[in-house]
Image: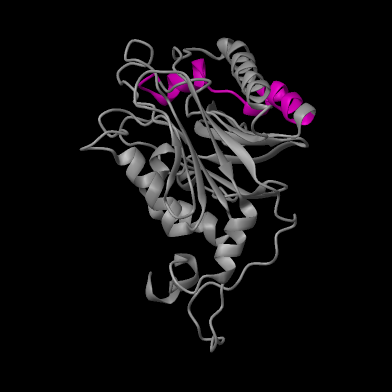
Amino acid sequence: MHSPPGRDAHDPRPAPLPAPAHAAPGRYYAAAMQTSLPALKDRESIPARVDELVRMAEGTLAGYEPFHDVRLFVFPEFAHCAPLYPSLKELLARTAVRPEDFTAPYERFCRANGVFVQTGSFIEHDPRYPGVAFNASLLVGPGGVLTKYRKVNPWLPWEVHSSPCDVPGYAEPLFPVADTEIGRLGCAICYDWLFPEPLRRMALDGAEVLIRVSAYMDPWGAQPPMDWWTLFNRARAAENTAYVVAANQAAQLPDYPPFSWPGGSMVVDFDGRILAQAEPGPFTKVVVAPIDIGTLRAERERRRGHDLRGHLRLGAYR
């Protein structure tokens, strides 16, 4: 982060971050893996769905190999199980799982190919928090599971799973950032992105690629006049000087009642420019675009203007 002349101990802006653990990678590609699949209604169906998603990633890797080295794969929210039940009791009884029990296929894929996968979300039950269900997504790399993100802002009143903020005694990091060989990666889920604070928190902790795992429904989609999906993805990229890789559900109404899902998965650069985007509609699509962490770091370092993290005056806000 650029430090203008004259900065002193009383400057209310965030302090510069330590150097990343990894050198900036060369230019690589990220894939937003948009799906249009029926919602799973029980945990017994999850292993087959995981295998299906891994096959989709394997096909993408092989298909793009002559052109792009795809290193990051992002799947949508509810890719494994959806909160189709109106009560927490039913969620826990029928769909909630320990996500780590289902990540082995992702781990094998990442280890064999030197890639990273942000899983679609799981309805999670952690025995340490009895009677609680989370909406969780895991970042998996060649060495296994790196981080777990639990949705901080459930879409009230429809989503009945919990925010970790509401769990007494919860002390785990709310906004983890993984320092990896493809850059510093942070993830937040769907409705979290309508709030600037979760993504700003990750950016202040060094996140360079902000990942959106989403099931963002119509009419707040990728088309005017209510194209909130596109609006917020671009805004979060620009205000944090970070890449955004956003995978959205694209299921039809009969597959994921009571909503239809507009898709529009996309990759955005650190100035808010759309690098690639799927057209709206109920399509299983793969959206691939370049990520250049070296250029991002150089721009964050050299800019004296329009790197909003560097000008943020934390002392001015409660």
- Foreground pick, 135 / 56: 56
Q: Which residue is drawn at 50% across and 15% down?
A: 94
Between 204 and 123, the one nearer to me in the picture? 204
Note whether residue 132 is visible: no
> In the figure, is residue 94 to the left or right of 141?
left
Quarter holding residue 196: bottom left
Q: In which quarter of the image is the C terminus?
A: bottom left
Looking at the picture, how far across and down is residue 50, in whole percent? 61, 18
Q: Residue 144: horizontal and vertical position, in percent?
A: 75, 34
Give the image location of residue 154, x and y in percent.
Answer: 40, 38
222, 8: nearer the viewer? 222
Question: Is 252 in front, or is 201?
Answer: 252
Relative horizontal placement of residue 12, taking residue 141 as reference (left or right):
left
Judged from this view, the residue extending furthest toward the front is 66
Magenta segment includes 109: yes
Report the side of 114 relative to 33 (left or right). right
Q: In this view, does 248 lie above or below 23?
A: above
Residue 106 appears anywhere in the view: yes
Residue 201: image location, x then y, percent = 50, 57
**Does 152 appear in magenta?**
no
- Asked where in the image residue 197 lies, by quadrant, the reply is bottom left
Which residue is outermost to the left? 225
What residue lies at 74% left-to-right and 56% top-to-bottom?
23
Q: Give the range drawn in magenta.
A: 84-111
